[in-house]
Image: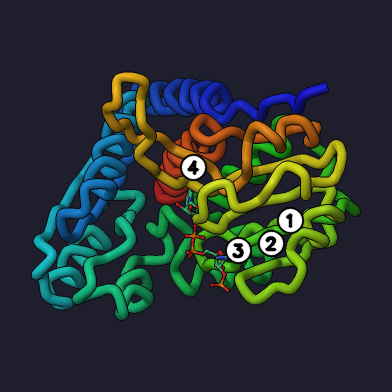
Amino acid sequence: MPASIIDGKQTAEALKLSLKKTIEVFLDQGIRAPGLAVILVGDDPASHFYVSSKEKSCASIGIKSFKSILPASASEDELIKVIEAYNSNPEVDGILLQLPLPAGLKSNTRNFLDTISADKDVDGLTTKNLGRLFTNSPETIYPCTPKACLFLLEKYGIEIEAKKVLVIGRSELVGKPISLMLNQKNASVTMAHSKTKNLEKEVSEADILLAAIGVKEFIKGSWIKDSAVVIDVGINSTNVKLEDGSLKKKLFGDVEFETALKKASWISPVPGGVGPMTVAMLLDNTVDLYKRHLNIK
Ligand code: NAP
């Protein structure tokens, strides 16, 4: 039997609707709207696309958007000033610095992230928040993509406790935080990376496989354990040739979807899996920070 689909798009829409209703209740009481500030440096088309889709999502549920676009030539001081202005703006609950930063600023990414006030750190990526995550603090603001993965597993009733989980990828954005979060849910987690030996064997033993690599269809369906659960975080854009000879951009995951479908019990597709849920989690974190700032439950 083919795997069942973990539908991130539908789950995200349902969550957005519930957030919209929550916000409406506060607005009806004359309380200000939640605010999300996005800072974009440079002219990377993919980053501009992500930022405008985040803006649209905010507008669709009643979150007020703030946006600063800086040129790729911006200095460190200019970027820090923009972050600090949002830190002290009482209408802003969450601040998101769109990554990756352009070449001139990239090596100092950690410093810029840590300039964001930890209590406005909507992406959960400041050192303080990562520390909260590490210590399982109730104050933790969970990074959006790992939170999206966990949300989907729980929403679909997939058991995590005592399961053998393989996370492929160890980035600060995805692999490390999700490994820790699944460990906190009592899974036995292995974190694999580019130096891992015999990845195929590791994959074949995992009850839950989470791929965050960034290489199109790198994991073959034949490697996957029968009835395993597959969460594909990868987003790999490739030009595919259409029948009329023209080229069209298509998104692929890190897992070979068609063959994995035959082995897995559950699988999140690309597109339509973790991607839309990541945006929904950004909105969820914004509303969470808003409630904390206004001291409302
Ligand atoms: P990243 O920082 O480039 O990390 C990639 C990880 O994959 C690294 O830890 C790397 O190992 C590992 N890796 C690379 N080649 C490998 C191989 N051959 N075998 C095993 N491991 C290998 O990427 P990221 O930011 O974590 O993102 C990963 C993917 O998720 C990308 O496709 C990205 O676009 C996507 N993504 C999606 C969302 C979403 O909303 N769905 C959000 C964020 C990211 P080393 O550490 O040894 O180099």
Q: Count neighbours of disc 4 (C-alpha within 10 A) and say few if under 14, some if 14 to 19, many if 20 or more.
A: many
Which numbered disc flags the more N-terminal residue, 3 or 4?
A: 3
Mark 1–mark 2 Cα distance, whole angstroms, equals 5 Å
- Circle 4 sits on which residue? 278
Which numbered disc flags the more N-terminal residue, 1 or 4?
A: 1
Q: What number is the disc on residue 130?
A: none
- Which structural element holds mark 4? helix
- Circle 2 sits on which residue? 179
Query: Which quadrant, please, contains the C terminus?
Result: top right
Mark 3 vs ligand 1: CB below 8 Å = yes
Mark 1–mark 4 Cα distance, whole angstroms, equals 17 Å
Q: Reply above or below: 37 against 58.
A: below
Q: Quadrant of residue 180?
A: bottom right
- Circle 3 sits on which residue? 169
**Cβ atoms under marks 1 and 4 closer than 8 Å:** no
Residue drawn where x is 49% and y is 23% of the image: 13
Q: Count neighbours of disc 1 (C-alpha within 10 A) and say few if under 14, some if 14 to 19, many if 20 or more.
A: many
Amino acid type, mark 1: Leu
Mark 4 vs ligand 1: CB below 8 Å = yes
**Cβ atoms under marks 1 and 2 closer than 8 Å:** yes
* Front in this rendered view, residue 116 or 33: 116
Q: Point out the frontmost of discs 1 and 3.
A: 3
Which numbered disc flags the more N-terminal residue, 2 or 3?
A: 3
Which numbered disc flags the more N-terminal residue, 4 or 2?
A: 2
Mark 4–mark 2 Cα distance, whole angstroms, equals 17 Å
